[in-house]
Image: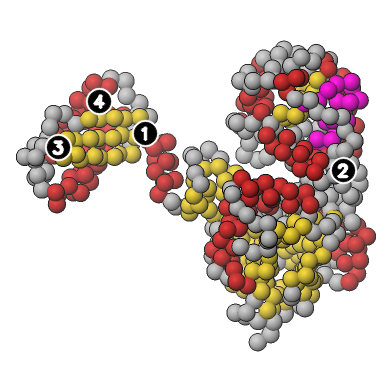
Amino acid sequence: MKDELLFCPLGGSGEIGMNMNLFAYGKPGEHKWIMVDIGVTFADDTLPGIDLIYPDPGFIVDKKEDLLGIILTHAHEDHIGAIAHLWPQLKCKIFATPFTAVLIKEKLKEKNIDATNYLKIVQLNGTVDLDPFKIEYITLTHSILEPNGLRIETPAGVILHTGDWKIDPEPLIGEKINSDRLKEIGKEGVLAMVCDSTNVFSMGKAGSELDVRKSLLNIMGSLKKRIVMASFASNVARMETAFYCAEKTGRQISLVGRSMHRIFKAARQCGYLKNVIEPIDAREAKKIAREKIVYLCTGSQGEPMAALMRISSYTHPDVFIEKDDAVIFSSKIIPGNEKKLYKLQNQLVRDGIEVISEESEFVHVSGHPNRDDLREMYDWVKPQCAVPVHGEHRHMIEHMKFAHEMKVPHPVQVENGDIVKLAPGKPHVFDKAPSGRLYLDGNMSVEEDAQSIKDRKNIAANGYMEVTILITAKGNIHKRPVLTFRGLPVYDADEFVYELEEAIEKTTRTFSIKSKKQEYNLIDALKITCRKCAKELTGKRPFININLVRI
């Protein structure tokens, strides 16, 4: 049997976020594997009690003896966020450039995981040899420090995995996109390009951080009172712009929010942000005049626990805003966050605070390739096969059309779990791997249909009721049942309890409760009775818990 080259996304194809990609080479049944990225996505209000979601790695956990390493393209959460949750199941080498490695170390340290002997730091534009894969890091530009594409060389051909990228002529911090090397790679020949699809519907170019800096400097120069600027903490170029604009407008700057301090510290540790003014502590900033301070804070998406939400609700211990101050949202609205973000902005406006966002001013550029950026990348790389990833289905289908437009001979459409045979022969999806999502529930990984999640959804929608029945040694009910309920629309509690007690007593009479053998049957019958009674009285079918206590 011939050696074959495979690609399989376990996350990030058919969704934005949660990126996890696998490449394999070898004879069927004897493949060697590498994983590219190990990311998370964030839960919404439909999943009470869940914060993080990540791909189910079961398919590759079963093959971990043949997993040569995890290669990380950059440090965004949707590419590294699951490392502390999933790496202990894999125990393989981790490869990252210096800035990404610093953040990885922090994540593992928080979970008391020692991966010192596994974490390998790769210098920018460096190489990693994991026979039969030879991996070259290619410096790109994105909305974070040290974003990398990967040239993955195998005996069957070369793959270019772009990771997240755009073409920024003036990224301000970090190197420009290594277009010379990308052109060389294209001339050498590329079997397949696995490419970011996020902004495929956006015409033109993604734009430059330099243009945002010029615009923000004009905006800040025109503001007379206190300025609060919210942005993604990971966008170090935007952070440097905030420092630059503060200095140029004669203001001090203060960082607010744990992530902002963490990224600032990591960037400094890796040799960035050396020539900016020193930030001052938020407690000290209270002593500075309103027109002489800029606060750079987390919470640009209206996150409930982030700094900006606490500032806007006047619960932050150190930062206070008042009428005529300004809040700049230097970020895009991530789809799904519109409701909470508009609520936050409406609150600010109602309090007389000026709100400046991408809807009113030029304060943000995306980190992903618009259509003209994609066109340029395809012109450089000239792949034989294009595999769109990192997008919802609508993005990837549009990217497929774009690849046809660019005359790519063999575009392949994938979704999570598809196994693509890139070589030998014409690239095509030929098999399916088990794939799915895991939810971080407390500190446990649970599956999508976990009972804990079903129960919480039920309680959230219908309320909760607990019934405790005391049973004497003779098998009689001792006094009245003890009833507790939460989340039910009850106006007359006495009447509600009376009706329930009647129904409970009627049901228990039909059982010989002296017999322990009938306990489970009685519990099931009481659940049905209580649910039915609650439905008739309130319209809700609560989650019911029955306790039988023998005294």
Gap in Å between the C-alphas at discs 2 and 4?
Answer: 65 Å
Q: In which quadrant is the N terminus drawn?
A: bottom right
Which amino acid type is marked by label 1? Gly
Q: Is residue 312 visible?
A: no
Q: Residue furthest bottom?
A: 1
Which amino acid type is marked by label 4? Phe
- The residue that label 4 is drawn on is 496
Residue 38 is situated, as x and y percent measured from the top left of the image, at: 65, 56
Q: Answer yes or no: do the residues labelled 1 and 4 have beta carbons within 8 Å? A: no
Which amino acid type is marked by label 2? Ile
- The residue that label 2 is drawn on is 173
Which amino acid type is marked by label 3? Ile
Task: Pick whichever of labels 3 and 1 is earlier in the sequence.
Answer: 1
Dominant SS in magenta: helix
Gap in Å between the C-alphas at discs 3 and 2?
Answer: 72 Å
Gap in Å between the C-alphas at discs 1 and 2?
Answer: 52 Å
Magenta stretch, residue numbers:
238-254
| Res 551 label | 3
The residue at the point 6 percent across, 40 percent down is: 474
Crowd band around label 4 with a 10 angstrom C-alpha radius: few (<14), some (14–19), many (20+)? some
Say whether residue 252 is magenta. Answer: yes
* Mark 4 residue element: helix
